[in-house]
Amino acid sequence: MILLLFFAALWTIHCQYPCVLHPMNITCEAFHYPDSSSEINTQSMCPTLSKMSVCDLIVSCNTSQNTGIYCTWFSLYKEACIEMTAGQMMAQCNDFLSMCPLNDNTLVHQCNTSILQLPPYAEMQKNNSNMCKSMPGMDGCYCDSCTELQRYGELCKEMGGGEECRGWEILCKKIPNWSICTNGPGDIIPEMKMFFHWGWYDYILFKGWIPYNQLTYAISFIAVFFIALLHEGYKALKEKLLMKWKSNYERIATEENSVNTISPQLVYRDTKYDWKREIPGAIYKSIDMALHYLIMLIAMTFNAGLFIAIILGYGVGHILFARLNKPKKRSRGSIMEVEESCH
């Protein structure tokens, strides 16, 4: 009886909407397959074949995780039928395949509706299993309330991408702000990886500094670049100050020895503690070491992108600031004094 009603409904749709049967008719360009029919067809597939990626997507669409155009009923219907073409085809997809044949012989504009083209459910399940076997301590492995799609997203966020996460990376390029693509503060603790790796999900110096997506990682990359650039400029400033102090010591030593030589012999002696010189020197040194160790700690994340940002920052900094402490020559009578920077 149920089957008779179902086929009767399909026949009614065919009679009401000739563009389902004849999509090449010129009048079909503006045809809109009803949302109610898309919803009925899509929803009716999930109880029978719950292991479909689109069924997990429907769960996400029904919650606050709104994915925009990908949550329209025709998009979900198309998603389901595209997924079904790789496996068991069901009668619910007859309308779609007739109206939107895979060879694109259709004038129905609605057939061009964007879809996520989710990875097949079996593929996601296999990838999730492989990731949990390689890193069994990940939180996503113990998320009992997660759908397979949500688990896939959580695991890939913790892994920071990888071979098993290619499908996830494609999804997240389409919807970068989707919850399975981004983390909120404190959602997942980044794992400390003691080897060079790519990915954006790492602690950077502070508990609250965690890039959660490509945008925040790009901002962090620029920030680390400028920290290294600042440190290189600061070192140039410090060396310039040291050169000035060294020049003063050489001048005093030369005057006291009255030695008319090209390389004056310095005389080291106890002098009165000079607060005006030693305290600023200590401050300069402290700031230099603070920046040095901050950059060292960033490098210790083993994040390859951040490491490149540090190298680029120092390289550009050298180009900009190295000229500040180049050796200078000057003559004083018969004495040639050469100021050289100390490293």
Image (tube, rainbow, N blue to C red):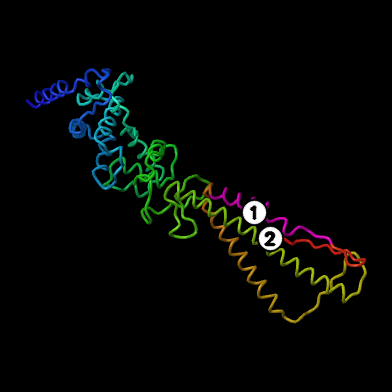
Describe residue 246's horizontal placement relative to residue 107 as left or right: right
Q: Nearer the viewer, residue 325 or 205?
A: 325
Q: Nearer the viewer, residue 18 or 48?
A: 18
Label disc, if present, on residue 121 of the rendered structure: none
Q: Which residue is mark 2?
A: 236
Q: Which residue is mark 1?
A: 317
For label 2, count other residues whose C-alpha is less than 10 Å away and answer few (under 14), some (14-19) or many (20+). Answer: many
Residue positioned 69% across, 77% down in the render? 276
Q: Point out residue 286 in the picture as x, y percentages from the top left corner.
A: 61, 68
Look at the picture and state if 290 lies above or below 37: below
Q: Nearer the viewer, residue 264 or 22?
A: 22
Q: Point out residue 86 in the picture as x, y percentages from the top left corner.
A: 31, 25
Which amino acid is tagged 1? Answer: Gly
Quarter of the image that includes the C terminus: bottom right
Which amino acid is tagged 2? Answer: Ala
Look at the picture and state if 207 lies above or below 156: below
Q: Which residue lies most toward the bottom here?
A: 272
| Highlighted magenta segment, given as a residue range | 306-329
Residue positioned 57% across, 53% down in the render? 225
Q: Which residue lies most toward the left here?
A: 1
Look at the picture and state if 61 lies above or below 85: below
Quarter of the image that includes the N terminus: top left
Q: Secondary structure at mark 2?
A: helix
Look at the picture and state if 86 lies above or below 231: above
Circles 1, 2 touching at the beta carbon (< 8 Å): yes
Q: Secondary structure at mark 1?
A: helix
Describe residue 116's horizontal placement relative to residue 204 as left or right: left
